[in-house]
Amino acid sequence: MVGTRVIPCLLLCGTRLMKTVKFKDARYLGDPRNAVRIFNDKEVDELVLLDILATREGKAPVEELIREIVSEAFMPVAYGGGITTLAQAKRIVQLGVEKVILCSAAIRDLELVRQCSADLGAQSVVGCIDVNRNMLGKAEVWTHGGTVNTKQDPVEVAKRLEDSGVGEIIVNAIHRDGLMKGYDTALIKSISSAVTVPVVACGGAGSIEDFRSAVDAGGASAVAAGSLFVYQGKFKAVLINFPTQSELESVLQTR
């Protein structure tokens, strides 16, 4: 059994399953419910759903779709996108979601993080930090689906999220999203070494060997990927897939 969680990260635009490159050029992949059924067959341990338009367009989570996906999923599901209140977070959990992911709302409203952590438990609250590097290579936190640059330092944001009660932190590298050229391990390391909660690396995985570098060099506790699990071949034909246990054991420690 592999000791590191390996998590497909599915992007939603409303009810559609999409995939982006650097948070842009969203490509339609199909029905997210069908993807979840395939991941069931692949015996995936955990799943992340992120609605990438909800906050950008000021929309609430699509609860009916979330309920349908969770009812289909054999694995724990974490959901993020459009959650701005404790009441919304509680409804998402009541739908069967195991963890709520707070992205833009967490950056601007730490009180929401505290409320969710106190009410739902830290283990059910995930902070998500979208990070892009500027032309000088400096890492900066972006919100609203990668359209608003807060110019905040991701390490300082991660510390504040931890102090406010998140149980883990997803670090999503905008500048690596969809490129399949590997994680930004320096970014992951800077955050994982500054906080004690688990850090999930996301953005850039192009092969299972990248998982090892995120864990060994980046200090990630878990790895998430999108393109790697929805595309096949150099022309990126849409094909939902997931490594076998033996393939994962070849690059990650077992327990």
Image (cartoon, grey):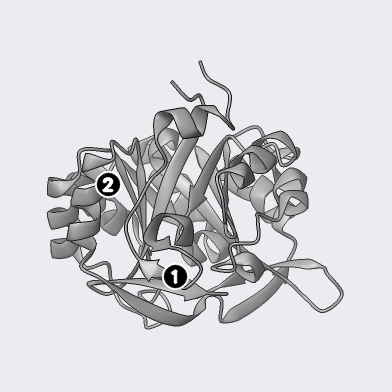
Q: Is residue 198 left or right of residue 134?
A: left
Across and down, in percent, residue 23 comes to 52, 75
Can residue 155 be seen in this snapshot?
A: yes
Residue identified by numbered label 2: 39
Q: Amino acid at mark 2?
A: Phe
Residue 144 vertical position relative to residue 210 in the rendered view, above or below: below
Q: Is residue 92 left or right of residue 209?
A: left
Across and down, in percent, residue 131 comes to 65, 65
Whichever of labels 2 and 1 marks the residue nearer the N terminus, that label is 2
Label 2 neighbourhood size at 10 Å, few (<14), some (14-19), many (20+)? many
Identify the element where label 1 is drawn: loop
Can residue 95 be seen in this snapshot?
A: no
Q: Amino acid at mark 1?
A: Lys
The quadrant where residue 96 appears: top left
Residue identified by numbered label 1: 236
Across and down, in percent, residue 201 comes to 59, 48
Q: Is residue 181 left or right of residue 62?
A: right
Measuring 62% from the left and 71% from the top, which residue is drawn there?
Answer: 142
Comparing labels 2 and 1, the label whose residue is closer to the camera: 1
**Farthest right residue in view:** 136
Identify the element where label 2 is drawn: helix
Of 28 and 192, the residue lying toward us? 28
Q: CA distance from mark 2 to mark 1?
A: 18 Å
Label 1 neighbourhood size at 10 Å, few (<14), some (14-19), many (20+)? few
Measuring 66% from the left and 70% from the top, which residue is drawn there?
Answer: 175
Location of the N terminus by quadrant is: top left
Of 115 and 170, the residue lying toward us? 170
